[in-house]
Image (spheres, rainbow, N blue to C red):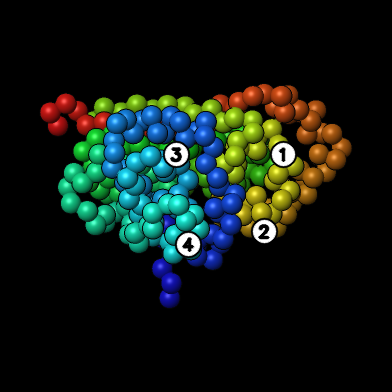
Amino acid sequence: MTRIAGDFDYEAHGGGYGRQRRPDPRIARPIHAALGPATTVLNVGAGAGSYEPLDREVTAVEPSAAMRAERPAQLTTAIAATAEALPFADGTFDAAMATVTIHQWADLELGLSELRRVTRGPVVILTLDPDALSRFWLADYIPELVRVEQRRFPAIDRVTSALGGLVEVQRIPVPIDCADGFGEAFYARPEAFLDARVRQGQSAWGFVAQLVVDRAVAELRADLASGSWDRRYGSLRRQPEFAGSLRLITARPEAGG
């Protein structure tokens, strides 16, 4: 029996992630800045390689064979391992990163402890704040999806407490033409959610019953056709950024620590 990495079966449903979840340079910039002057970087839960810096020596860890296969040729081959049991000596890397992956880990605290153990400098985490997820208009069409995500993503305070050290939490705004295909990326492009390929690139849909998905998509399609969506949310089509749930957490070791 194939072991599922995390709470979502990427072996069965991970195809196309590399196409739908492309890094957006405006989100990449603060991530890479948070890594500081690091030359060796560990990327844990690396998936298809989104947001890995190309100008540094990156070691990628990804437990899913399907996701490792999605990595483009210019990136390093990912190591098959999990966050909770990193196969590296203490202090191996200048910095570590984990982008939209910690909600998949079986043991959050152990995984973050492992990142800190193998890293001399900053640990950089891109995640979603579950307390902010309900701000997105999609919650009005499929609240079941939002409740799923609120259960999956750990509270920001829990993450910062586990990381320790000097911790900074930064709100990352989502640009209107965001290239990364996560849910809030389409805040101004509601038609995207009618495309099953877009939904396939967002794992939360896989936790909601198909009847519920079909109902929500049908309601959204009808509201777009009638103009109801635009009457309620149309101003978002002209809003250059959305202050949603995306957060960048940077934890640096305390001096002398």
- Residue at numbered disc 4: 69
* Image position of 5 with respect to 92: above or below: below
Q: Is residue 151 left or right of residue 157?
A: right
Name which residue type carries label 2: Gln
Name which residue type carries label 4: Ala
Q: Position of residue 223 (x, y in %)?
A: 81, 39
- Residue at numbered disc 1: 190
Could one spot residue 208 in this view of the protein? no
- Residue at numbered disc 3: 127
Q: Quadrant location of residue 100?
A: top left
| Mark found first going from the N terminus, 1 or 4 | 4
Q: Position of residue 119 (x, y in %)?
A: 23, 42
Label 1 neighbour load within 10 Å: few <14, some 14-19, many 20+: many
Mark-to-mark CA distance, 3 and 1 = 22 Å
- Residue at numbered disc 2: 210
Mark 3 and mark 4 in contact? Answer it, CB < 8 Å. no
Name which residue type carries label 3: Thr
